[in-house]
Amino acid sequence: MSPVKMTARGVNVYYGDNHALRDVSVDILDKTVTAFIGPSGCGKSTFLRCLNRMNDTIPTARVEGSITLDGQDIHDPAVDPVQLRARVGMVFQKPNPFPKSIYDNVAYGPRIHGLARDRAELDAIVERALTRAALWNEVKDRLSSPGTGLSGGQQQRLCIARAIATSPEVLLMDEPCSALDPIATAQIEELIDELRQTYSLVIVTHSMQQAARVSQKTAFFHMGQLVEQGDTTKIFTNPSDRRTQDYITGRFG
Amino acid sequence: MSPHIVSAFDEDLRAITARIAEMGGLAEELLTTALEAVETRDSDMAEQVILRDKRLDRLEHEVDDLCVRVIALRQPMAQDLRLVVAALKMSTVLERIGDLSKNIAKRSKALAQAQRINLSGSVVRMGQQTLRLLNEVLDAFSSRDVALAVSVWRRDIEIDEFYNSLFRELVTYMMEEPRIIGLGSQLLFIAKNLERIGDHTTHIAELVYWIVEGEPLGDDRPKGAPVSMDGILG
Ligand SMILES: Nc1ncnc2c1ncn2[C@@H]1O[C@H](COP(=O)(O)OP(=O)(O)OP(=O)(O)O)[C@@H](O)[C@H]1O
Ligand SMILES: [Mg+2]
């Protein structure tokens, strides 16, 4: 078994009066893909945002409970949220490229964290990130055109390239393939599998088949609660909870 | 079980279950008729079994096609997936039971030409016991009755024991009366076929358990000792 990379204990999230997450506890293992599944609005994105303190940026959001990264509390005042987000990277549900060139989108992180000594090294990082995100061939001749001018699926892959360019230790992906065609989806799944050798990954997906294909652990959320978590094979062949069963087999809850 | 949001999925699963139930009914019918053919030595009945078995073969292919289609189009999960996979296996098992019944029916035609011996009564009784278990396991499948499936699974030992004692009796009888070796060995093959039908029946019981529980039925099933010639020859 891989060591634990992140832990969450008794996490509650409120948006104003809306109690969006109730008492969630889960371990995120290193070198493992963990899938979060569950009906729309059940709190998957909310929980994902807890893991790199993205909810800090939402004024109405209040997070309770403890979350650790390598044993350290991420809410500790000594933790700089910007540094945290470099270690715990994120690909959002909606592609959000910066209004900059394709090149600059990917080079942004490596630049601010000083990961390249010169232009040649930066070029290499950008090419490698774009290649792994299955986008290089489509954009290599127009690296200086704006990222926002790409198609939806290309923008999503650009955001994946941006997220992996800084080599985060944990990568959070919120429905990374929802706008991708089957070929690009397969390439991203291949990338996820490759990244798993080195990183810890958490992926939110609405595709049961995708969750089953890419993850080793699965957690099922329902109405703000974490209903069931365990080995992916177990969850998809013989879940313990009736709500999980109904959800994954496509039944009325 | 709540219905699927996509109702055509429910219809597909119902169609698979219905075909399996039909195959089960047909397998029972074939075995019943084959046993009657043994008992009454009626060769018309034997012919009937051979003809009806073709329908079972066709149904096996229908079930397989349906299951492959459901897997390809609907990607079933959890208990739905188990049902589809179990149906694929059950169709094979039921088709085998049909074949074994057909074989019994064919052998009964050979019996028809021979003189009657007492032991054919024991073979028929063994057959009726086998039929009862088949009957119950098919009920267990239709009603997803795990307790009944486990009970059938445990009682297969009765068939094994029946077979072992028949084997001894028949061999003893044939040694005493070499004239009936031809007839006796037909009966022996029939008993062997019944014993194998019993094994297939326990396999179905295991599948029913797996569909419902999601884990295999343990393998501590009581089994009869393998039949040996010790004490008969020697
Ligand atoms: N920024 C926000 N402000 C206020 N409420 C929010 C905010 N984000 C989410 N919520 C609420 O929190 C609950 C959980 O939402 P969340 O986005 O985490 O669901 P989700 O599981 O990711 O759904 P989906 O699968 O549709 O993406 C919902 O009731 C939602 O309305
Ligand atoms: Mg979401």
Image (cartoon, coloured by chain):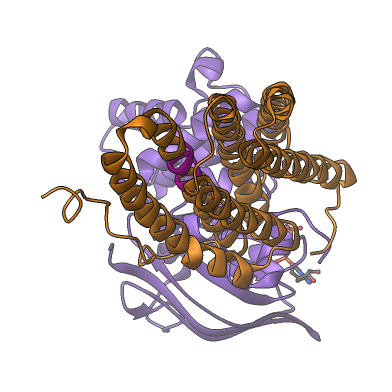
Q: Residue drawn 57% across and 31% down?
A: B108
A152 sits left or right of A30 in the view: right
Residue B192 is inside the magenta segment: yes
| Chain A painted colour | purple
Whether residue B52 is visible to the viewer of this picture, yes or no, is: yes
Quarter, ligand 1: bottom right
Picture quarter with the N terminus of chain A = bottom left
Residue B199 is inside the magenta segment: no
| Magenta segment, prevailing SS (helix, strand or loop) | helix
Whether residue A89 is visible to the viewer of this picture, yes or no, is: no
On the image, which quarter does residue A21 sit in? bottom right
Residue bounds of the magenta highlight = B190-195
A204 sits left or right of B73 in the view: left
Q: Residue furthest right?
A: B7
Q: Residue drawn 54% across and 38% down?
A: B116
The image shows residue A72 at horizontal and vertical percentages of: 34, 79
Q: Residue drawn 33% across and 45% down?
A: B173
Using the image as rendered, state which of residue A107 and residue B203 is in the foreground: B203
Chain letter, colour orange in render: B
Q: Residue drawn 33% across and 54% down?
A: A31
On the image, which quarter does residue A39 sit in? bottom right
The image shows residue A148 at horizontal and vertical percentages of: 69, 32
Instruction: Note whether A138 is above or below A5 in the view shown.
Output: above
